[in-house]
Amino acid sequence: MHATTKSLRFAAAVGAVSALLAWSGQASAADDDFFDLDLREVMNLEITTASKKPQTVSRAAAAVFVLTADDIRHSTARTLPDLLRTVPGLQVASISSSVWAVSARGLNGRFANKLLVLIDGRSVYTPTFSGVYWDVQDTLLEDIDRIEVVRGPGGTLWGSNAVNGVINIITKSAASTQGTSVQVGGGSDERAFVGARYGGTLGDSGHFRVYAKSFDRNASDLSLTGTTAFDEWHQVRAGARADLNPRERDSLTIQGDAYSGKAGEPVIAGFLAPPFHVISPTQTETQGANVLLRWQHEVSSADSFTLQSYVDYTRRDWPAHTLERRTTFDFDFQYHTQRLSSQDIVMGLGYRDSDVAYSASFAGIPAMTLPYLQITNRDNGQRLINLFAQDDITLLPRTLILTVGAKLEHHEDTGSELSPNARLLWTPTESSSVWGSVARAVRTPSQIDRDGQPLTAVLEPFGFQNPQAALIPAFTLNPLPLPLLIQSQSTVESEKMTAVELGFKQQLALNLSVDLALFNNEYRNLRSAYFGALTCAPSGLPVPACLFLPPGSSTHVVQSIPVGNFASAKSRGAEVSIEWLPSRTLRVQAAYTLLDTSSTVPANLNEAFTTDRANGAPDNQWSLNATWSPSRNWNLGAVLRGVDRLNPAFDVLVPGYTELDARLSWHPSAAFEVSIAGRNLLHDSHQEYTSELLDVPLMSVQRSIFGQLSLRF
């Protein structure tokens, strides 16, 4: 089929979706409400992430956005990062079929390190780079109850690395997932996927469920040539959960997951001899398992506590980077009391022990490839203890609440860190609230920060013509006659951030609500680097003296890049979300994010720069999400989203783009649903991001269409 014909067909499809949505505003309202929640219920949706206790969205003194089970069911997304694309304040960008850059309020990257992610209260942050391996964070999407996204610092409750936000993925209880559910599907990008879940009772003691899922995802394309990137992604996962009520005042949850997968990655293999660079298809192998135990006990009508502990094991064989084996043990105790008049106190303590072993991984890559990561202390774990307390003080009943709190953490490597906050919530009416906050958060060094030697790049000698030049991003030119090895050495301490926020939430009418958040973040001791001395290897002589030695005396030049805490940065912006129900059959959600980020480095350091790229997130991004249910049996959803251009890595500019996702479903009964979905419908392909380490070539996201059949019985 010719490209012109394809474009016309997709344009017609887009026009049809637009016409249907426009016509629905004039359609007569049905007798039934086809959405699970109306706006009043959304504003009063109960959440726990913002304060570690139940509260409603409208009474949270924080920038909170909730993706409900209804939002997830109507979405075209098949992965957790793609589900987050319409959340205001979040930046989500695809690097390859299995790799994303996800951050809140800027400073994004593949190795973004200022966003904490939880699944049912279990932290999935990795101390390797203080971030998240998104390719191994998954569950049966149909079992997710909600995703709570809190933008802004959460260090007082959740500790270090909850700097720019916290994402908590909360699954449904076992009692609400009874019976059997099966989902099968496939298409152009999501080549095949299957998921199944069975839930039952445990006598009078409680309920349980078990699930399994598997998927096979197609490869993306290399942006510069349009050929395959060999980054196919396959994964198998299974898990179980049991919710027990041994006594009237007790509840016990036991749950766990296990997974195994492979993901292709086209690594830019670097050498100190010709051809200096080649694209090498590799396979990253991942395995892991976790078990979590949570006991909740009601001491009295005013007091309760939660005891949670989990063990998490991960293994990642990442060629040209590292082979990592990590076991994490975490213990957390939390006490909630309302015994004191006009006060609501949450306090607790925790301990975490994360043991790791690193080794080199060269599976499937050419001999003499230079590793991108070298970790000198290969058997160094991380241990930390913490104490926290937070008090909601009612100054005026149902009108004015002051929240004060702090968390003290002691890290084995960096010592003690304090993360305090103060928040004020004013609710002049039941349908409106105004809030403000001042908070401090800390990003503690990762193990790469403390013990790593990242290889940034190998620059080819002047005049050399690489036969694969068309596949490799254009690096800065090397004016020297020898290859230039850029090698960093880290001595990084904790980063600090102070945030001032102001927010407004208002239900303007029964069918219209708005949520606005303004923020100003100031970062200190930000991880940064500068260009150090140029020396020849193996002689160790300085440049240019060594260039006059006889040929063969030096094989390459080393550009040292010392990394420390030299920089500061500012990030300010606005986030707004609007929800509108023009009829009982149509829901419209709009989100817009304005972001301005800048960084400052010392003038006395040679070409100093911050490693958290200020322009690695778009200045503007927006989304418009419409869901139309003309009858009980049909549902049509469409998301139009736009992202500004950005600069994720040196010498790499990614153009802005606008894309459309759509889904049509037919469910003649509660037990049966068939749907067809399309993602990125406006273009054949587009690039969204690349790794800031410049370890992979530029890859593009393709247009995709897939179908799904769901059965429940």
Image (cartoon, rainbow, N blue to C red):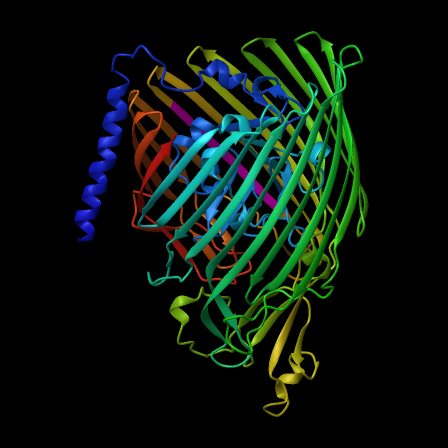
Residues 221 and 651: in front is 221
**What residue sits 38% from the left and 54% below the top?**
700
Query: Can residue 114 be seen from the camera position used here?
Result: no
* Furthest residue toward front: 203
Q: Which residues are magenta?
A: 588-598
Q: Position of residue 349 (x, y in %)?
A: 79, 34
Query: Can residue 298 be seen from the camera position used here?
Result: yes
**What residue sits 59% from the left and 91% below the top?**
551
**What residue sits 69% from the left and 79% below the top?**
542
Using the rendered view, name the quadrant where residue 520 is placed: top right
Q: Position of residue 52 (x, y in %)?
A: 67, 27
* Furthest residue toward bottom: 550
Q: Is residue 589 magenta?
A: yes
Q: Is residue 709 left or right of residue 173?
A: left
Q: Position of residue 541 (x, y in %)?
A: 70, 81
Q: Position of residue 236 (x, y in %)?
A: 48, 50
Q: Is residue 302 left or right of residue 573?
A: right
**What residue sits 38% from the left and 56% below the top?**
220
Residues 442 and 335: in front is 335
Quadrant of the image containing the C terminus: top left
